[in-house]
Amino acid sequence: MQPLKTPFGFYSTADEVADGNELTGKQAVITGGAAGIGLETARVLASAGAEVTLAVRRPSAALEVAKRLRHATGNPAIKVRELDLSDLRSVQSFVRAWTGPIHVLINNAGIMAIPELERTPQGFELQFGTNYLGHFALTLGLRRFLAAANGARVVSVSSSGHLFSPVLFDDLGFDFVPYTPIGAYGQSKSATALLSVGITQRWRDDGILSNALNPGAISTGLQKHTGGLKTPVERRKTIEQGASTTVLLAVSSLVDGIGGRYFEDCNEAMQVVKRPTDFTGGYAPYALDAGNAARLWELSEQLIGLR
């Protein structure tokens, strides 16, 4: 099967991808929607008429962001709700307070390359717990609201960093394998891609589909522990370009009926057999493997107390 190609590419912006889409009456939830590519995604979806909820760890700071977004887009339906993905109690509170269908859930928030091994309040390695497990619990908790939309999409923001590590099923918390900041980040982003595979496997009959993406190299607060971007200048993107693949998977008819795949530069990525060193991208087979997705889903249910 040939990878899906679209008219868009590396230099396309989120505005260009969203052009012509009418989202009035649609509800979108964006984790980490008050900064970086999450903020640009929120702006574009709100400009197209969507009701947008910014799910953020620091709602007091996001309130001013939401105010500016309402002014910039002319859309008053932009809300802020507290969500700390590193703490499953916060995820549960968010889910319990939610009402109404969700047409688009964008699992965007993340942390990167934490220098030392840290753990969540529930004891999980911090990057795995925040980037993946918090989003897993959130998505599961919101399932009935996604199903109520009759055609919901869940977008998983992964990374080319997934190429640095598969999911270490026998040592998720680095109790035996030596912890490395980028290895832990890689594991969390491989898990994020597998989440989209699992959602599509299990929930397609509910009308819920999911795809994962690599947004590209964009200079944001995400790189605060890495000393900034290491990607060659010619392979870097603006925030407007970095949000484009997220928006494509969230709203474009070009991906109608498609799930469980991995995109970059607004097109489906090619599978690679080893990690490229020239920043050309691609996805590792372990990140979309159906068996890995099923195993991770069942294990994740155990970790959050559903099994």
Image (cartoon, rainbow, N blue to C red):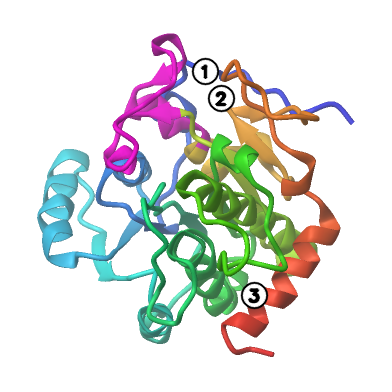
Q: Quadrant of residue 265?
A: top right
Name the side, left or right, on which 218 lies relative to 106. Answer: left
- Give how far apart the Cα atoms at labels 1 and 2 are: 4 Å
- Can you say whether 121 is above or below 112 in the image? below
Q: Earlier in the sequence, mark 2 or mark 3?
A: 2
Q: Are dots 1 and 2 in contact, CB under 8 Å?
A: yes
Picture residue at 76% right of the left edge, 61% below the top: 293
In this picture, which residue range is highlighted in magenta?
217-245
- Mark 1 against mark 3, which lies toward the viewer? 3
Secondary structure under tag 1 reads loop
Q: Amino acid at mark 3?
A: Ser
Residue ID for mark 1: 10
Residue ID for mark 2: 265
Indicate yes or no whether the magenta region holds residue 242: yes
- Can you say whether 222 is above or below 168 in the image? above
Q: Percent from the top left, x then y, of residue 220?
A: 29, 36
Q: Amino acid at mark 1?
A: Phe
Choose between 272 and 143: the one closer to the eye.
272
- Give how far apart the Cα atoms at labels 1 and 3 are: 34 Å
Q: Amino acid at mark 2?
A: Asp
- Mark 2 against mark 3, which lies toward the viewer? 3
Picture residue at 52% right of the left edge, 18% below the top: 10
Q: Earlier in the sequence, mark 1 or mark 3?
A: 1
Q: Percent from the top left, x then y, of residue 4?
A: 74, 29
Choose between 279 and 45: the one closer to the eye.
279
Residue ID for mark 3: 300
- Give how far apart the Cα atoms at labels 2 and 3 are: 30 Å
Q: Percent from the top left, x then y, of residue 11?
A: 46, 15
Q: Quadrant of residue 271?
A: top right
